[in-house]
Amino acid sequence: SDSSAVGALAAAGGGVLFASGWLVWIDGVAAAANDYGFGTPGADWVPGILQTVALLMVNAITWSAMADGGFDDSVAQKVKAWVFVSFVFAFSGLIASTYILVRESNSPTAPGSHDSAVRGLLQNLLIFGSSLLFRAGRLSDGD
């Protein structure tokens, strides 16, 4: 059916965006190390990890459970809390990667640090888009 085709395309597109996000980041880290001898600090990895966890969290639940009065209203409340926390993770990743980019733009810690900061923000935007595309694809399948 058309909805399953849309869901499959959304899943494929989401997968491409997710893989592209991590590829851009890892390429930036490797390039900074190879070209400038800059070792990316561990804290700069956190936004991408937060964004990845948010992607998993948002797509781990069924949206029908939020409105479902099912067995107990507390189920819907727990699902809403889960979605809220997952979006907190997602926006925390975006905010942190933006902060890192602004920090490196104003006072670079080393040659090549600005390039990896730009790639960190791009990674977060791609993974966030991937998360939304996965979710939209699942919604088109009736979830």
Image (cartoon, rainbow, N blue to C red):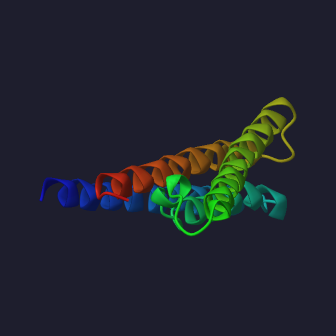
Q: Nearer the viewer, residue 58 or 129?
A: 58
**Does residue 73 sit above or below 99 in this rendering?**
below
Which of the 4 image quarters holds residue 25? bottom right
Q: Nearer the viewer, residue 7 or 111?
A: 7
Relative side of 102 to 7, left or right: right
Give the image location of residue 73, x and y in percent: 63, 59
Residue 75 visible to an observer of this rendering: yes
Relative side of 96 to 70, left or right: right
- Quarter in which the N terminus is drawn: bottom left
Which of the 4 image quarters holds residue 36? bottom right
- Quarter in which the C terminus is drawn: bottom left
Residue 37 visible to an observer of this rendering: no
Q: Nearer the viewer, residue 47 or 142?
A: 142
Give the image location of residue 96, x and y in percent: 77, 45
Q: Residue at x 57, y 66 (%)?
A: 56
Which of the 4 image quarters holds residue 101? top right
Give the image location of residue 125, x and y in percent: 56, 44
Q: Residue at x 30, y 52 (%)?
A: 140
